[in-house]
Amino acid sequence: MEHRIDRRALIGLGVAVALTASSLAMFRTDSGTASSHREAPAVIGDPLNDNTDVYAFVSPDKPDTVTLLSNWIPFQEPQGGPNFYPFDTRSRYNIKIDNDGDAKPDITYQWTFRNEDRRGNATFLYNNGPVTSLDDRNLLFRQRYTLRRITENGSSTLVSNGIVAPSNVGPASMPNYGTLRSQAITSLKGGGKTLAGQSDEAFFLDLRVFDLLYGGDLSEVGRDTLKGYNVNTLGLQVPKEDLALKGDPKRNPVVGVWSTTDKHNGGKFVQVSRLGNPLVNEVVSPAGLKDAFNALPPAKDADVAALVKRVTDPEVARLLASIYGIKAPATPRKDLVQIFLTGIAKGNGPIAADLNAQSLNKDAGKPRPAEMLRLNMSIPPSKDPNRLGVLGGDLQGFPNGRRLADDVVDIELQAVAGAAQSGKLIPALTDKVDTNDKPFGGTFPYIPLPSNASVNQR
């Protein structure tokens, strides 16, 4: 049985996109390590620099601002002490913005960290009594950070001595963790906010997709594999003008967003992590290219024939056909090129009046094909959000940016199966995990507080 998709939600996904294959260069594999939920071979040994998810959306309670969230350090067992989960003091953590379509960062928000460790040889404890505030002397290990905003005109320091919200040790140690989280939210000049600290792992999905696509018969679905785990979050809420080209969101409301980690290695910083759209390196890049993908800047994506081919002829579509008999559209998949590499162009019909713009989230100029999370800041927050985002007729959802509640697994499965071209959803094609186990907040940073109960007790 199939369901029709709202015609407005298709937005011309079948519009042709020309990609040149000239001057192709293969990936280097010696310049970086890994990114996302353990999807690249080298990430296993470097979890502090493992970038798990990126979110970008118009703030629902402050629609004149955009919220950016990026998470690191996956699969944090809440009771994994005594050292718990600090940021890496040898690394630079970045959220990058492209506001002119060339796939190069026009704005970089960069966090660096330093430790305050008072334990020495006296104790193994993270804290030696209840912690009721960020400056509580019972908190024996604390991290501080510097946040800089970097553009072609130079660098400015937004926060010079911020305090990281600590790992949530447990109710005896931190009887009101929400207070600690609130104290860690720092106001920025010009009306913005930022947060560094631990959060609930808000990405909801059944990871048994790797067991031959949910067991080969869709029997292995319905269990949120990430339930109960935590991550480390860097969050930012800024006015749209801070992100837009020349400070004018009306000039070009579309921005590309991705995050990276640069690790100090051999006397220089090397990019070891990169993340934009969810699940790209997990299920698009083949094993031999995964580490190298994370060292590559988006501006070079279109020059790599092997990567472009993985989008235009996706492996997941072939697996869906061989395992479940779901026939995907013919290749090359120009619809997926728009979703992952160029942004989605405006189609004909009623969408023109709805958007009053040149596209859903394709840059108004001639954007360079690159894997980034693209957000059209001119589209207001949805009054009735749909977890399927654009495929569910909700233009403010993924792949137009990404909200915490967007069900990106189901969206991407449906898109790979051809929903954006056919206008039809396949109800059975789902991991049956539709929501996070914890509710999202109504104000910044929106992502839930971290858990403190052991995962095997939940």
Image: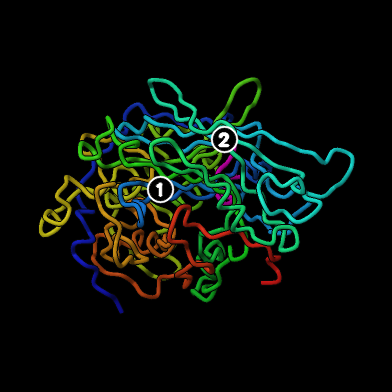
Does any portion of residue 29 appear in the rendered image?
Answer: no
Image: 223 above or below 449 = below
Residue 198 placement, left or right of 186? right
Q: Earlier in the sequence, mark 1 or mark 2?
A: 1
Q: Which residues are magenta?
A: 32-41
Q: State whether residue 123 is above or below residue 329.
A: above
Pick the front one: 212 or 53: 53
Q: Quadrant of residue 116?
A: top right
The mark lying in front, picked from 1 and 2, is 1
Kindly tell me whether residue 199 is visible in this rendering.
Answer: yes
Separation of disc 1 and disc 2 at Cα?
A: 24 Å
Residue positioned 51% across, 71% down in the render: 216
User: Is 386 situated left or right of 315 in this image?
Assistant: left
Magenta stretch mostly in which secondary structure? loop
Q: Residues within 10 Å of mark 2 (few under 14, many from 20)?
A: many
Q: Position of residue 307 (x, y in %)?
A: 41, 41
| In the rendered image, the vertical position of residue 8 relative to residue 401, given as above or below | below
Q: Badge 1 is on which residue?
A: 67
Q: Of the numbered discs in the image, which one, if any, rests on residue 367?
A: none
Q: Residue at x 50, y 40 (%)?
A: 274
Tag 2: residue type?
Answer: Val
- Residue 5 on the magenta segment: no
Residue 11 image offset from top left, x and y in percent: 20, 55
Instruction: Give the x, y percent position of residue 325.
Output: 39, 70
Identify the element where label 2 is drawn. Answer: strand
Q: Which residue is mark 2?
A: 272
Visual colour scheme: rainbow
Q: Quadrant of the C terminus?
A: bottom right
Q: Is residue 206 left or right of residue 137?
A: left
Q: Amino acid at mark 1?
A: Thr
Position above or below: 68 against 319: above
